[in-house]
Image (tube, rainbow, N blue to C red):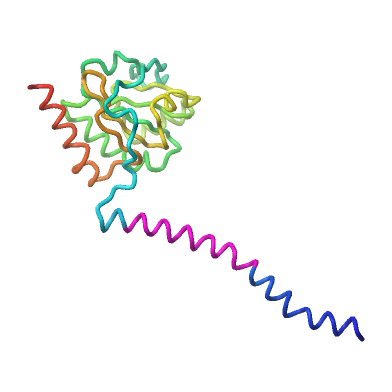
Amino acid sequence: MTLETEDTSLKPQRNRARYALALIPLMVFAGFAAVAGKMLYDQDVNGLDVSAIPSALIGRQAPSLTLPPLEGSNTAALTDEALKGKLTLVNVFASWCVPCRQEHPILSELAKDNRLNIVGINYKDRNDNALRFLGELGNPFNAIGVDPNGKAAIDWGVYGIPESYLVGPDGTILYKKVGPFDERSLTQDLLPAIEKASTAAKG
């Protein structure tokens, strides 16, 4: 009888402990949601672009490139010669990257701009998947270098893909974009940077 009485008296405590344990994941999720919400609020309301992470490379010479071509793409290898003397957008992409797919139409439109040379670093991808990606969405790149181990991406200080760098004709990195281009980052950031670089090259 005594044992049964003790078990019954412990039930409320055990139930409370179970509820407390069940609440921990919810509290952690709520914390992450609050942080994410604050970032989105800052971006939308205060006009801050949380993806525009500064790079120590801006204003410096771009790292050297000696990447082999994407076989089957009929596109040149990505070497320093592919950038030399041209205003170039270096785009780091992969077929498995969903945001890369989202920004690809913008790259295709930029490829029509005669002021700009677009090249790609294919990051940790499979050759057949990359070819399928470009075959489906189109190939805006004048040169593509394969970076299977991510070594070139490390040299360029890549945070995560997609990521893009605007490189001047003299090899200086002028602008960096972390994450996919959208209409706002295109019109407010990249296009003005292209215009400024083009005007400086003429003058």
Q: Residue furthest right?
A: 1
Residue 180 image-quadrant placement = top left
Q: Exactly how many numbered labels are in the figure?
A: 0
Q: Quadrant of residue 175?
A: top left
Q: Is residue 23 magenta?
A: yes
Q: Looking at the rendering, in which quadrant would you find the N terminus?
A: bottom right
**Residue under the image location 10 percent in, 27 percent down:** 199
Q: Residue furthest top?
A: 81
From the top left corner, tell me how far across and down residue 156 is, in percent: 38, 26
Q: In the rendered structure, does residue 49 fall within the stretch colored magenta? A: no
State whether the magenta stretch is mostly helix, strand or loop. helix
Give, as a single range, the part of the protein colored magenta: 21-41
Vertical relation: 91 (above or below) 170: below
Whether 15 is drawn above or below 194: the answer is below
Q: Residue 98: give x, y in percent of width and height.
A: 41, 42
In front: 137, or 88?
88
Q: Position of residue 147 (x, y in %)?
A: 45, 24
**Image point (81%, 83%), residue name:** 8
> Which is nearer the eye, 116 or 96?
116
Front residue of this view, candidates 115 and 137:
115
Which residue occupies 41% across, 24% down? Answer: 155
Whether residue 183 is situated above or below residue 156 in the rendered picture: below
Q: Which quadrant of the figure contains the C terminus?
A: top left
Residue 97: x %, y % from top left: 43, 39
